[in-house]
Image (spheres, rainbow, N blue to C red):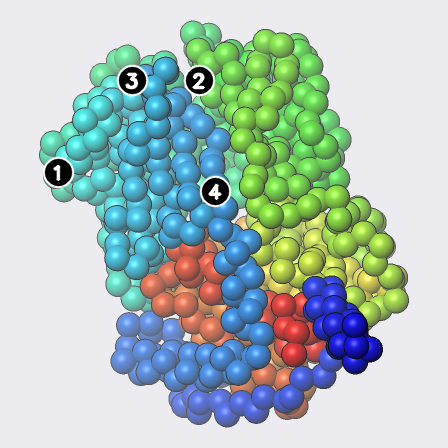
Amino acid sequence: MDKTVIILIATIMITACNTKKEEASLTTFDHLSVKYPVTSEDSTKEDYFGQIVADPFRWLEDDMSEATGKWVKSQNEVTYDYLNKIPFRKAIKDRYTELYNYEKYSAPFKEGDYTYYFKNSGLQNQSVLFREKKGGGPEMFLDPNTFSKDGTTSLAGMSFSKDGSMLAFNISEGGSDWQKVIVMDAVNKKSLQDTLDIKFSGASWLGNDGFYYATYAKKGGSVLSGLTDNHKIYYHKIGTPQSEDVMIYGSDTKPTRYMGAYVSENQKWLFISTANETYGGAVYAKDLTNPNSKVTPIVDNMSNSHYVIDVDDQYFYLVTDLDAPNSKVVRAPIANPTSSNWEVIVPEKQEALSASTGGGYLFCTYLKDAVTKVVQHEMGGKIVRDIQLPGPGSAYGFGGKKADVDLYYTYTSYTNPATIYNYDMKSGKSTIFKASQVKFNPEEYESKQVFYKSKDGTKIPMIITHKKGIKLDGKNPCMLYGYGGFGVSLTPYFSTSNIILLENGGVYAVPNLRGGGEYGKKWHDQGIQMKKQNVFDDFRAAADFLVENGYTSRDLLAISGGSNGGLLVGACMTQDPKMCKVALPAVGVLDMLRYHKFTAGAGWAYDYGTSEQSKEMFDYLKAYSPLHNIKKDAYPATMVTTADHDDRVVPAHSFKFAAELQKNHQGDNPVLIRIETNAGHGAGKSTEQTINEEADVWSFMFYNIGLKPKYLVN
């Protein structure tokens, strides 16, 4: 063979080999210039305890106005013009689409003669509900993809009657918290005429003739109207209009912000939970065997958290943190359920507790440094066994009906895709029911937990995930994600989206900040109101740890969080603009002086306090409120994300923050806002919306830290 031909063949082979082994690399991309829309300002000001605070972009709070609509359109034009110029945006979207395209199942559940489960064939916008009879094949029962043409109307909840013959299901249009309840004959799969408007509630059936639910007095249009401060419990009789529903509990003179109604499995009791804030609340009961019975308190202490998990002929079973910050399980005599008569059946431990029942057993789920541990008990409290989980991670689903002999739970971690297990309650044996088909090899990656010190010396846990064998040389891209609020615990979970970062040599880090629930109520309370700065200090200390220990550098670090986590990102980037290279505040609470004026925002006062509470509280809030702490400075590359239908953390927070940021930002980093249309606070997004948003987030981050993904070979 001619030598030239041999060299040519060798060159082709080497090139092909190198292409196959193409890895992500760091580079310097061209600067993409951005011309921001001019956002008009007005003279709006407000007096807080003698201090005048300007609010020049308050007009953006009116989400129904033509002016706000034009502003949204102009901002999106700028943002998508920028994103469209990122050379690998389509490649990332294609890769994420490929990763997302696998069959997904939910854990099964039993109703009447059927076993139900959700299935998504891969890229369906919404998962489809199937059912099977014993010995029969699968039958499609309810397809949410038929609810709307664009897939943005989602199934948001459902409740079957005890015998499984009737169904009431919630639908959310565009992700709104205002939902419709539709009633269905589950045997014949026929929808009835009953349709109700509700918010923050589902249905709880009494027999097959009707159900209890909660809703507010009026729906409201703009976020400035229909403030949700008067929840009430109603009973709906099938075949009648909602206007004829009977109010069971509630008051116009003493309004309660949040209520819930739940009929016991034995159909003898209606339990009602009431709260004015996102923490704490009372529990009441109504004897459904006596038509003339009144709603009476089981525990009317609104300063602690309590919830009923079961009832038998003698006792109510509750989980409470009264005199037990990590919670305990008690049983209260039905004849006199006041707290002085409670019997502790599972005492408080060092780990935070939640509990559920099924098959005549009590299941206690604990968090040990944010990792799940589950203990099975007899209903009297005696331990049956510690349930052996597949590994350190998160497990959920330990609950069911009294007659069940087995249950299904889901296990996941940062490196293990969600796997559904069948658990035999008598033997304690777990077997795999459905393994995930996502194209990911856990053996190539590792997660490890570290502990670092925050500013005040408090030890904070953090789980760090990355490819095995990475060098701690400060040259690894890193996403630092946090929340830190409302007693919410961030436990290990697998995200298909995070594969995009991990397979490109990135590091994913999640600290368990104060304000969360990982260590019970005391941990939560260390990050609220006048202690909220602890949360931001914890997050900034996590960034310091990652940089100081070689996981990443400031120029390769992105910070991310949503909702209360959006507040976290907004506060940290305004307190320390040099903390990171990229900031991604999503659907954030960013105006801390007015958050309680919108929809259900006033209910968050336990965590935040309010600007009207006292001068001291006003001063504290203003000192960290992201909107009010933007100054002339060079900020990280920022992409604020929100949605036009978000009626929980209203988009005005993000609109005003983005306008103020664009006004004051100095430097070349882009500061953009991406506004999803026909979407809400997060839940219920279509697959298409999810893929597009995640691809845009990773593209924005990669471009601004100079990470050339391995899919881009030129």
Query: Of the residues shown, which amino acid type is indicated by label 4?
Result: Glu
- Where residue 255 sits, quadrant-wise, is top left
Secondary structure under tag 1 reads strand
Q: Sequence-wise, which precedes: disc 2 or disc 3? A: 3
Foreground disc of the pair 4, 2: 4
Q: Amino acid at mark 2?
A: Lys
Amino acid found under the numbered disc labelled 1: Gln
Q: CA distance from mark 1 to mark 3?
A: 21 Å
Vertical side of 381 occupied by 395: above or below: below
Task: Give above or below for 495 relative to 701.
Answer: above
Point out which mark residue 163 bears. Answer: 3
User: Which type of secondary structure does the marked residue at label 4 adopt?
Assistant: loop
The residue indicated by pointer 2 is 401
Q: Nearer the viewer, mark 1 or mark 4?
A: 4
Residue at the spot x=47%, y=65% of the render?
Answer: 692
- Which disc, if any, is residue 601? none
Q: Is residue 587 above or below residue 420?
A: below
Q: Residue at x 52, y 39 (%)?
A: 280
Mark closer to the chain start, 1 or 4: 4
| Circles 1 and 4 in contact, beta carbons < 8 Å | no
Q: Amino acid at mark 3?
A: Asp
Indicate the secondary structure of the residue bearing disc 2.
Answer: loop
Q: Dot 3: few (<14), some (14–19), or many (≥20) neighbours within 10 Å?
A: few
Which tag, 1 or 3, sits closer to the chain's start?
Answer: 3
> Which residue matches tag 1?
193
Q: How far apart in space, not on screen, are marks 2 and 3 (Cα)?
A: 12 Å
Where is mark 4, residue-wise?
A: 103
Observer able to see residue 8:
yes
